[in-house]
Image: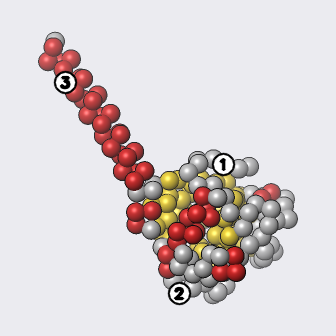
Amino acid sequence: MKTLRFKLVLAVTLVGALAIALVTIAAAGGGHSIREHLTGYQEVPALSTPGHGQFRASIDRAHNEIHYRLTYGGLESDATQSHIHFENRTNSGPVIVFLCSNLGNGPPGTQACPANGGTISGTIKPADVGAGGSAQGLAAGEFDELVRAIQAGATYVNVHSVTRPAGEIRAQLVHGKSKTHH
């Protein structure tokens, strides 16, 4: 009986230590998550659209990477492009990172957007940070500045469509919080 109890205590202790180690590794690597819901109501100006989406990302400061996944659908017309922009929630701002484009206007290697909705994923690295925000102090390649802008709530992701070229659905990015805006 004592042997079984000892094994049980040892197993619980090991599981607890492993959980603490994984949390510590994630925190050291900057493994913060973002999960946001895209709607037309967050566009500027607000739109009533059946379009919807979800953006998930994890910031890895140790490797200067942001791993993301964008899923969207229900747009009023075909998707044309998607970006991360630099601006607060009440304004439209410049493109900082291309996520996808069907217009041929993205940097080399930009993936195509699923026209009728779908999922894209990828990794954002310093070389993917464009010069669109230079006038506001976020220059090309400034990955740390992009992360700081995300932490400050000064970036948003949106999906543009044929009938809504300025953007049909949008979500302000909030770093370190798993929250959903409706």
Which circle's residue, 1 or 2, is located before the other in the chain?
2
Q: Please, what secondary structure does the residue beneath circle 2 have?
A: loop
**Label 1 – label 2 distance at C-alpha:** 32 Å
Quick check: marks 3 and 1 in contact, CB under 8 Å? no
Instruction: Point out which mark residue 7 bears.
Output: 3
Disc number for residue 120: none
Return the residue at label 1: 180
Q: How is the image coloured?
A: secondary structure
Q: Is residue 160 left or right of residue 14?
A: right
Q: CA distance from mark 3 to mark 1?
A: 42 Å
Instruction: Look at label 2 and name its amino acid.
Output: Pro
Q: Is residue 66 left or right of residue 25?
A: right
Residue 79, x across and y down, in percent: 69, 73
Q: Position of residue 125 (x, y in %)?
A: 48, 73
The answer to whether residue 104 shows anywhere in this view is yes
Q: Which mark is residue 108?
A: 2
> Which residue is pictured at 80% across the width and 57% down the height?
41
The residue positioned 45% from the left and 68% from the top of the image is 64
| Mark 2: few/some/many CA within 10 Å (<14, 14-19, 20+) | few
Dot 3 or dot 1: first in sequence order is 3
Q: Helix, strand, or loop for circle 1?
A: loop
Q: Of the residues shown, which amino acid type is indicated by label 1?
A: Thr
Secondary structure, mark 3, is helix
Quote the CA–CA distance across marks 3 and 2. 56 Å
Q: Tell me if mark 1 has few (under 14), some (14-19) or many (20+) residues whose alpha carbon lies within 10 angstroms of its own.
A: some
Q: Position of residue 166 (x, y in %)?
A: 78, 74
The answer to whether mark 3 and mark 2 are in CB contact below 8 A is no
